[in-house]
Image (spheres, rainbow, N blue to C red):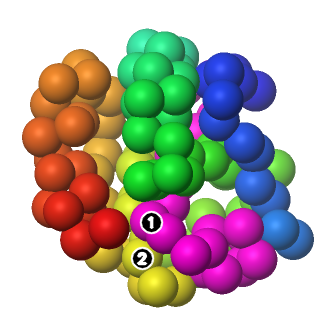
Amino acid sequence: MIHAAGVAEVTDTTFDEEVLGADFPVLVEFTADWCGPCRQLAPVLSAIAAEETGRIKIVQLDVDANPGITSRYAVLSMPTLMVFRGGEPVRSMVGARPKRRLLQELEDVFAAV
């Protein structure tokens, strides 16, 4: 799996505790080894994880290895970025994007922290 520095990996087993039980917003990247746009997104997520420590937690979930969570949230395209707050999905975005655009799309998430 393509690991972004500073970005933890979650699984079907750890998802509920790490994501749904988190005290602040969590951005989950649903990713796969074969996903080219996921590789493009890795440095963007690493940078945001480093810059926004304490405001948002960023994790990756390998869709091929974790079909339970993938189907629970009806994820069909990679990468799918889903933001969870208080155990609920509050935003979903599909596809790679530059850092500036992703930060703009997350502004309301940060404002609520």
Kind of residue sitting beneath label 1: Pro
> Dots 2 and 1: beta carbons under 8 Å?
yes
Determine whether, in the image, residue 93 is placed left or right of residue 68.
left
Name which residue lies at 43% across and 29% down: 51
Q: CA distance from mark 2 to mark 1?
A: 5 Å
> Which quadrant holds the C terminus?
bottom left
Q: Is residue 77 left or right of residue 19?
A: left
Range drawn in magenta: 15-38
Q: 24 or 10, which lies in front?
A: 24
Which numbered dot is residue 85? Answer: 2
Q: Residue 80: where, in percent of width, then height?
A: 41, 48
Is 48 or 78 nearer to us in this picture? 48
Q: Is residue 87 magenta?
A: no
- x 17%, y 24%: residue: 100
Relative depth, front residue between 25 and 95: 25
Residue 1 appearing in the image: yes
- Say which quarter of the image contains residue 83: bottom left
Disc 2 secondary structure class: strand
What residue type is disc 2 on? Arg
Residue at image position (51%, 42%) is 53
Q: Is residue 79 above or below residue 57?
A: above
- Residue 37 visible in rendering: no
Residue 1 percent coordinates (x, y): 76, 27
Q: In the image, is residue 21 part of the stretch drawn in magenta?
A: yes
Disc nearer the start of the sequence (2/1): 1
**Residue visible at 81% across and 50% down in the picture:** 65
| Residue under label 1 | 25
Q: Residues within 10 Å of mark 2 (few under 14, many from 20)?
A: many
